[in-house]
C-alpha cells in the first residue's frame, strides 16, 4: 500500500523515533472533526463506542476499491494478486503491532464479539464437561458474558465471576480461590469499557497459568491506548476490534498461540478454510485460513493495517502519554462540578470517565450535551451486570482518543454546567 | 440554551421528572405492567385499578421505576390523565399521544391538554421511546386483562 501521508509509512514494529506529538496536526488528519453539530464544533467523546478514522484509512479503503478490488487467495491474475498481497500484508502489520510470534497466529474476524464466540465454540465448548467452570470478571462487556452463558447451557458448565471493589478494580485476592482445578478458561477484559479500569492482566495470566488455565484477553478497549505485546503478556488468546482502533467496522482480530489454534476445530465451514473437499470428507486448510471461512472483509483488513501503521508512526507511548494527561485534566474538570460523581476510580485507568449527576439522568445529560456539539454515551454500555454491581441504572460516559484536546473537555464541562442550570 | 432544548425540557417536564405524581406501588391494582427500554435501561412498572363491570373505568393509576426526565414526566402525566377514563378511552388517548409525538401528517390533532408539553420530543427522534415507554406499558396492561406482571413490554 502506498500512502502519501508521511505519518503512515509502514514501519517494523513500534518506533522510538516518532515525530513529536502535535495535536493540531493529528486533528487535521481526521476529516470528521471538521464537522459542526447543532452549530458547534464537534467534541467527539464516544471513542469507547467507536473511534473516528484518519484520512489515510479512508483513502486506503477507497484505493482498494478503486484500483485493486478482486477476491483473495484464488485468482491467477494481477488484481487478485494485488488484493491478496495487501490483505496478507495487513496480517503482517497486525502481527508486528501486537508482537505475535508468527503471522499464522493472526485470524481476521468481524470484531471482538466474533473472536470471543470463535474461542467459545472452537476451543472451550469441546473441552467443557458438566461441573467445569469458565471464569470472567464483573467488568465484562456483554460480548464476554453471553457467549459463555450459551456454551455453559450447552455443556452443563458454570460461569464464575471475579468480584470488583467499589472503585472498579478486580479483587486479585479472590482470583486464586476462583482458579480451581475445574476452571477451564479465564476470559478477562484488558480495559473496562465502562470504567476505564486497566486490569493487571500480566499478573493474572501468570496466576492462571500456574494453575494450568488458559486465558483469553478482550483487548477491545486496550489496543487503541496501550502498547500490546502478546508474547510478554503470554496471553493464549487476545481479541480486538478494528473500529475502535481508528480502522473500519466489520474487521477485527483474534490472536491465538499456534499450539492452541492447531488443536481447535474450525468455527465455520466454507470456502478458503479447506485444502481438499470431497463429499465424504474435508481436509482443513492450514493456520490461519482454517478459521477464515468465506470471502473475508478485504477492504476492512487493509483499512485496519493502515490504521495500525498510522498509530505506529505516532507511537503508542506518545498516544498513551497524551491521553493520560488529558484524562487527568478531564478528571479534575469533572471533579470540580458539584453534584457530579465519577463512577470508576481505579488507580490504573485508561481515558474513560463514567459519571452520574444529581441534577439529571444520564440520558438527559447526553441530549443537552449533544446540542452543544458534545457526543458522549449514556446508558449501561453493554455492561448491565456491572451496572447492577455498582448500583446505578445508567451512567454518562466520556471516552478519549488520541485526537481529543482540552477544548473538547472544556466543551464537556461547560455543557455539564448548562445541564445543572437547566435542571436545577 | 437553544429553542429546541427549551421546548423539550419545559418546566412542567422538569417538575414532573423530578417530582413524579402517582409515584408508588398501587397495592390493590387490577393491572400491572412492566416496561423496559433496552436502549438506555429505563424501567418502570405501571399499575391500574380498573372498576370491573359492563362499564369498566380506570379508578387509579400509578407507577414506579427509574429513568430519564422525559420517561418519568411522561409516565407521571399519563397516570394523571388516566383517572376516570374507560379502557377504550385510554387506548384512544394512546393513539392520539403517539400521533402527537410522531407528528403523523394531519394537523387536525386533538388538543391533549397538559400532555401537549411533550410535543418538544418530536425534535429529538432518539428520545421518542423515552416518552412512550409508560404508554406502551399502558397498552400492555390493558391488553393482558388480569394480572400477569411478569411479562415485559419493550420499546424495541
Ligand atoms: C470491552 C469490550 N469488549 C467487546 C466489545 C465488542 O466489540 P465489537 O462490538 O466491536 O465486537 C466492546 C465494544 O463495545 C468492548 O468495549
Image: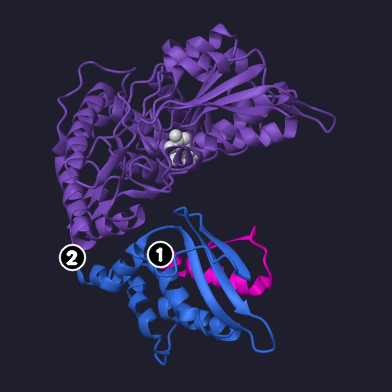
Chain colours: A purple, B blue
**Secondary structure at numbered mark 1:** helix
The answer to which of marks 1 and 2 sits earlier in the sequence is 2
Up-down relation of residue A378 to residue A231 (above or below): below
Distance Cα–Cα, label 1 vs label 2: 22 Å
**Figure quadrant of residue A305:** top left
Task: Look at 65% across and 57% down and name the residue there.
Answer: B150
What's the magenta region? B128-156
* Mark 2 residue CB less than 8 A from any atom of ligand 1: no
- B144 part of magenta stretch: yes
Foreground of the two, A217 or A383? A383
Residue A317 at what x, y percent from top left? 25, 21
Which mark is in front, 1 or 2?
1
Q: Is residue B141 magenta?
A: yes
Name the residue carrying label 2.
B1
Residue sticking out furthest to the front? B28
Q: Is residue B20 visible?
A: yes
Q: Position of residue B88 (x, y in %)?
A: 60, 85
Q: Against B85, is A222 above or below?
A: above
Q: Chain of mark 1?
A: B
Q: Residue at x 60, y 66 (%)?
A: B32
Front residue of B56/A65: it is B56
Chain letter of mark 2 equals: B
User: Which numbered circle lies on residue B72?
Assistant: 1
Q: How many marks?
A: 2
Nearer to me, A271 or A112: A112
Q: Quadrant of residue A170?
A: top left
Q: Quadrant of the N terminus of chain B?
A: bottom left
The answer to whether A216 appears left or right of A164 in the picture is right
Q: Residue furthest top?
A: A210
Q: Residue at (20%, 34%) from the top-left corner?
A: A326
Amino acid at each position: 500500500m502506498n500512502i502519501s501521508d508521511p505519518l503512515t509509512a509502514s514501519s517494523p514494529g513500534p518506533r522510538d523515533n516518532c515525530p513529536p506529538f502535535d495535536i493540531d496536526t493529528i486533528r487535521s488528519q481526521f476529516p470528521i472533526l471538521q464537522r459542526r453539530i447543532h452549530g458547534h464544533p464537534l467534541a467527539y467523546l464516544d471513542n469507547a463506542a467507536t473511534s473516528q478514522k484518519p484520512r489515510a484509512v479512508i483513502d486506503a479503503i477507497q484505493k482498494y476499491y478503486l484500483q485493486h478490488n478482486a477476491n483473495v487467495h484464488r485468482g491467477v491474475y494481477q488484481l487478485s494478486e494485488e488484493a491478496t498481497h495487501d490483505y496478507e500484508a495487513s496480517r503482517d502489520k497486525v502481527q508486528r503491532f501486537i508482537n505475535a510470534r508468527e503471522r499464522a497466529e493472526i485470524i481476521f474476524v468481524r470484531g471482538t464479539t466474533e473472536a470471543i464466540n470463535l474461542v467459545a465454540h472452537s476451543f472451550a465448548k469441546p473441552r467443557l464437561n458438566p461441573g467445569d467452570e469458565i471464569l470472567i470478571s464483573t467488568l465484562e462487556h456483554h460480548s464476554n458474558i453471553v457467549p459463555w452463558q450459551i456454551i455453559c447451557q450447552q455443556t452443563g458448565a458454570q460461569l464464575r465471576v471475579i468480584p470488583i471493589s467499589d472503585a472498579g478494580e478486580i479483587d486479585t485476592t479472590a482470583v486464586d480461590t476462583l482458579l480451581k482445578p475445574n476452571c477451564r478458561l479465564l476470559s478477562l477484559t484488558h480495559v473496562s469499557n465502562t470504567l476505564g479500569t486497566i486490569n493487571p492482566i500480566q499478573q493474572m495470566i501468570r496466576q492462571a497459568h500456574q494453575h494450568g488455565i488458559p486465558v483469553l484477553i478482550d483487548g477491545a478497549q486496550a489496543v487503541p491506548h496501550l502498547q500490546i505485546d502478546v508474547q510478554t503478556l503470554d496471553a493464549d488468546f487476545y481479541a480486538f476490534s478494528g473500529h475502535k482502533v481508528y480502522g473500519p467496522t466489520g474487521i477485527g482480530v483474534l490472536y491465538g498461540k499456534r499450539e492452541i489454534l492447531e488443536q481447535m476445530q474450525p468455527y465455520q465451514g466454507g470456502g478458503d478454510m479447506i485444502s481438499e473437499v470431497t463429499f465424504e470428507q474435508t481436509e482443513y486448510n492450514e493456520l490461519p485460513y482454517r478459521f477464515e471461512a468465506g470471502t473475508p472483509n478485504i477492504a476492512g483488513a487493509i483499512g485496519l493495517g493502515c490504521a495500525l501503521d498510522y498509530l505506529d508512526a505516532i507511537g503508542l507511548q506518545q498516544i498513551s502519554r497524551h491521553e493520560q494527561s488529558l484524562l487527568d485534566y478531564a478528571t479534575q474538570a469533572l471533579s470540580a462540578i458539584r453534584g457530579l460523581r465519577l463512577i470508576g476510580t481505579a488507580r490504573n485507568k485508561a481515558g474513560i470517565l463514567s459519571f452520574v449527576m444529581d441534577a439529571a439522568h444520564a440520558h438527559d445529560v447526553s441530549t443537552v450535551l449533544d446540542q452543544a456539539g458534545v457526543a458522549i454515551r449514556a446508558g449501561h454500555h453493554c455492561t448491565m451486570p456491572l451496572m447492577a454491581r455498582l448500583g446505578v441504572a445508567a451512567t454518562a460516559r466520556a471516552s478519549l482518543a488520541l485526537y481529543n484536546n482540552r477544548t473538547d473537555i472544556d466543551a464537556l464541562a461547560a455543557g455539564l454546567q448548562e445541564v445543572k442550570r437547566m435542571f436545577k | 440554551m437553544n429553542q429546541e432544548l427549551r421546548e423539550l425540557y419545559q418546566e412542567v417536564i422538569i417538575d414532573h421528572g423530578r417530582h413524579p405524581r402517582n409515584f408508588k406501588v398501587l397495592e390493590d391494582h387490577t393491572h400491572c405492567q412492566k416496561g423496559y427500554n433496552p436502549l438506555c435501561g429505563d424501567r418502570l412498572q405501571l399499575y391500574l385499578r380498573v372498576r370491573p363491570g359492563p362499564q369498566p373505568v380506570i379508578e387509579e393509576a400509578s407507577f414506579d421505576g427509574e429513568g430519564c426526565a422525559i420517561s418519568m414526566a411522561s409516565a407521571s402525566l399519563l397516570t394523571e390523565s388516566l383517572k376516570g377514563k374507560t379502557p377504550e378511552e385510554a387506548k384512544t388517548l394512546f393513539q392520539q399521544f403517539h400521533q402527537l409525538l410522531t407528528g403523523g401528517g394531519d394537523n387536525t390533532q386533538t388538543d391533549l391538554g397538559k400532555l401537549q408539553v411533550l410535543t418538544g420530543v418530536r425534535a429529538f427522534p432518539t428520545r421518542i421511546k423515552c416518552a412512550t415507554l409508560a404508554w406502551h406499558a399502558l397498552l400492555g396492561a390493558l391488553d393482558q386483562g388480569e394480572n400477569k406482571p411478569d411479562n415485559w413490554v419493550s420499546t424495541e
